[in-house]
Amino acid sequence: MSNVNPDAPREYEAAAERFQFLETESKDLEAAASDLRKILRELDEVMRVELARTFSAVAEQFVHFFQLLFNGGTAKLELTDPDDIANTGIRNHSAPATGAKRSPKSPGRCSLAASARFLPAR
């Protein structure tokens, strides 16, 4: 006959309790991860909406200040990929009132484009 472990029932009970504890913790972690994924989806949506709203306000102010600084002319900011606003670029179309297009590297145009980043959104 082999030796019998007299502590086996106690060890089994401890292992069963530990298993139950870890199983509960695992379920809690899975629920927390699911909640975090839901929160991230909600935050992504809020950021898309706010970015679109802010871009619209900045684009409006860009036109206003461009026409103010250049005594007229046309200016427009547009998103390169409006369907993916989180990863899109911004395209600047502008022409002074004289109708002659300036080089994209001209200091005035670069300054105006750079200042568009700092215009207050209303």
Image: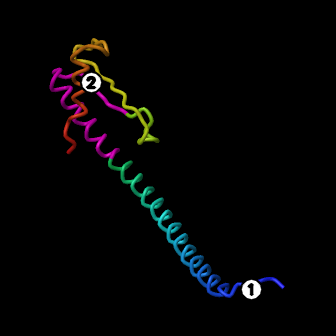
Q: How many marks?
A: 2
Taking depth in this image into account, of 24 and 62 the one nearest to the observer is 24
Q: Magenta residues, as a range? A: 51-78
Question: Horizontal and vertical percent for residue 8?
Answer: 67, 84
The residue at the point 30 percent across, 14 percent down is 105
Which image quarter: residue 85?
A: top left
The answer to whether 61 appears left or right of 50 in the picture is left
Q: Residue at x 62, y 86 (%)?
A: 10
- The colour scheme of the drawn protein is rainbow
Task: From the image, tell me which residue sits under label 2.
Answer: 74
Which circle, 1 or 2, is nearer the viewer?
Answer: 1
Q: Residue at x 15, y 23 (%)?
A: 69
Q: Which residue extends farthest right?
A: 1
Q: Tell me residue 62's x, y (percent).
A: 24, 32
Asked whether, in this view, residue 17 is left or right of residue 61, the answer is right
Q: Position of residue 94 (x, y in %)?
A: 29, 22
Give the label on residue 4, or none.
1
Provide the secondary structure element on which disc 1 rests: loop
Q: Earlier in the sequence, mark 1 or mark 2?
A: 1
Q: Is residue 60 magenta?
A: yes
Overall secondary structure of the magenta section: helix
The image shows residue 41, relative to residue 103, as above or below, that is below
Q: Residues within 10 Å of mark 1 (few under 14, many from 20)?
A: few
Q: Is residue 18 left or right of residue 78?
A: right
Using the image, determine if residue 81 lies above or below residue 95: below
How many residues crowd mark 2 within 10 Å: few (<14), some (14–19), many (20+)?
some
Q: In the image shown, does 35 or 9 lie closer to the viewer?
A: 9
- Identified by mark 2, the residue type is Thr
Secondary structure under badge 2?
Answer: strand
Quarter of the figure that contains the C terminus: top left
